[in-house]
Image (cartoon, rainbow, N blue to C red):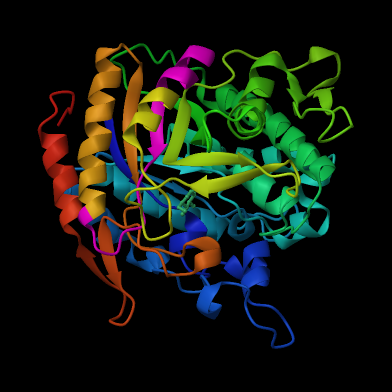
């Protein structure tokens, strides 16, 4: 029952057919008045890799690589283009996609969210609106009611704190906000939304028991973890910077789900206000479990430097040594350490929900796969309750602010030749590694 998969997301692969133009990211990358798209090379995801139409071919490729699951997301802006108005045709199309996966032996894992939002949500303040979590549950309930026959593996969110950091703290992606208060508010609302979504999924599909050895089910999320080390191991300030950043990036949001209270632990000399509030008045929503499993997204190790000029006085530096085309360095030891830390802090089954590398040459990706697999073998020997691995990504796709520049796919896409799909050698390396592991059930 071990999940061997690959991951991608709606906006990065589908193209706008079905109503993508109703989303904040569409607006962001297709600015009005002839202004230039802020995406590298002026790229957009208007066509992306046309997964919306070419899904049968992609699912067949995944099956031929011996995968038994695929992870993607559904598009809120296509499903609920105007507030309270749901598009049944779009939902039926998604049902066809996920039924096709099941028919070819791949369990779908579906995220309700992967960075994009409907314009109507964005125009009302997005995750700063006190009603945002309620609106989100209305939408996610509609999705579960429609897809419950084809899916029993859900994600409340993909990387909520990446959205918070990039969209609310650093103004790099919609909604382009840049304050610690806004970041806190958005984190608080998404944390509330997570708990409400878990409660909703359980009310429709029940609480899975997820005993070791049984097929993992229910609702989790994909959380982005980074492995941080001080830039200078002897510098007390660099060490403090690692501590502040790990708290904010890796732990604060997940801790709030466990404790019911979100706290941003930032030293007073850096930020004087207290950010520490209950998620629900009077400790409401003490649901159990709070996740059916946790998804760990891992790409890189970072060296952290104290920098008084940055908003929270930290600077990320790429570690020396081989790295992907975007400068990220895969560090298998970091993956092993994070797996231990996460399961010690949160006693839920674990899934590696993303891991991969931007590597047009493909050579480093092959090594990453072998190294990630042996790191997982050791984790299983250490009795970590690991239930699956999803490589990011099945195919090259729209890499957000970088457009199509970075190649993450097990399958290469020829953008000059009708989006032709060509499995890379690393796809076959992954298949070979899967075949060597007895935990695979045919
Ligand atoms: C995101 C993906 C993205 C990948 C590589 C992850 O943080 O979930 O959407 O493509 O990183 O940048």
Residue 94: x and y in percent read: 45, 53
Residue 410 covered by magenta stretch: no
Q: Nearer the viewer, residue 13 or 141?
A: 13
Residue 1 falls in image quadrant:
top left
Residue 214: x and y in percent read: 31, 17
Q: Is residue 131 left or right of residue 300?
A: right
Q: Is residue 355 visible?
A: yes
Give the residue drawn at x 64%, y 47%.
163
Residue 356 covered by magenta stretch: yes
Q: Nearer the viewer, residue 274 or 390?
A: 274
Q: Residue furthest right?
A: 273
In the picture shown, does residue 196 fall above or below 4? above
- Magenta span: 339-363
Q: Nearer the viewer, residue 294 or 52?
A: 294
Count of numbered tags: 0
Q: Is residue 222 visible?
A: no
Give the residue drawn at x 52%, y 51%.
74
Residue 198: x and y in percent read: 60, 26
Residue 39 falls in image quadrant:
bottom right
Q: Nearer the viewer, residue 230 or 160?
A: 230
Residue 67: x and y in percent read: 23, 42
Give the residue drawn at x 55%, y 49%.
114
Give the residue drawn at x 17%, y 28%.
440
In the picture shown, does residue 334 fall above or below 304? above
Q: State the quadrant of the C terminus.
A: top left
């Amino acid at each position: 029952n071990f999940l061997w998969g690959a991951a991608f997301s709606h906006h990065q692969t589908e193209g706008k057919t079905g109503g993508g133009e109703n989303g904040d990211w569409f607006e962001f990358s297709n600015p009005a008045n002839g202004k230039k798209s802020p995406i590298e090379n002026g790229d957009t995801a208007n066509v992306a890799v046309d997964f919306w139409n070419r899904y049968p071919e992609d699912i067949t490729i995944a099956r031929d690589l011996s995968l038994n699951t695929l992870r993607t997301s559904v598009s809120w802006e296509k499903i609920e283009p105007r507030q309270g108005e749901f598009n049944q045709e779009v939902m039926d199309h998604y049902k066809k996609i996920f039924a096709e996966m099941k028919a070819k032996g791949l369990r779908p894992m579906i995220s309700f969210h992967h960075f994009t939002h409907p314009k109507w949500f964005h125009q009302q303040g997005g995750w700063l609106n006190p009603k945002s979590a309620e609106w989100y549950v209305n939408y996610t309930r509609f999705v579960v009611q429609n897809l419950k026959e084809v899916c029993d593996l859900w994600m409340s969110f993909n990387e909520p704190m990446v959205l918070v950091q990039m969209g609310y703290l650093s103004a790099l992606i919609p909604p382009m906000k840049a304050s610690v208060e806004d970041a806190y508010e958005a984190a608080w609302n998404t944390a509330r939304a997570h708990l409400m979504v878990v409660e909703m999924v359980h009310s429709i599909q029940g609480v899975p028991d997820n005993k070791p050895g049984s097929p993992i089910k229910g609702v989790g999320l994909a959380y982005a973890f980074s492995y941080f080390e001080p830039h200078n191991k002897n510098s007390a300030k660099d060490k403090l910077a690692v501590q502040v950043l790990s708290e904010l990036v890796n732990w604060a949001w997940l801790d709030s789900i466990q404790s019911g209270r979100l706290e941003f632990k930032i030293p007073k000399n850096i930020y004087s206000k207290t950010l520490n509030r209950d998620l629900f008045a009077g400790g409401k929503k003490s649901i159990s479990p709070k996740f059916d499993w946790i998804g760990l997204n891992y790409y890189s190790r970072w060296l952290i430097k104290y920098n008084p000029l940055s908003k929270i006085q930290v600077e990320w530096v790429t570690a020396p040594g081989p790295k992907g085309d975007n400068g990220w360095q895969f560090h298998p030891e970091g993956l092993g350490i994070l797996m231990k830390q996460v399961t010690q802090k949160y006693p839920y089954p674990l899934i590696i929900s993303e891991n991969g590398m931007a590597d047009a040459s493909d050579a480093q990706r092959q090594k990453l796969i072998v190294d990630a697999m042996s790191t997982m073998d050791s984790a299983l020997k250490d009795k970590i309750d690991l239930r699956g691995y999803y490589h990011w990504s099945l195919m090259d796709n729209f890499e957000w602010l970088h457009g199509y520049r970075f190649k993450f796919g097990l399958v290469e896409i020829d953008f000059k030749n009708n989006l032709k799909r060509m499995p890379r050698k690393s796809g076959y390396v992954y298949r070979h590694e899967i075949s060597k592991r007895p935990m695979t059930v045919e």
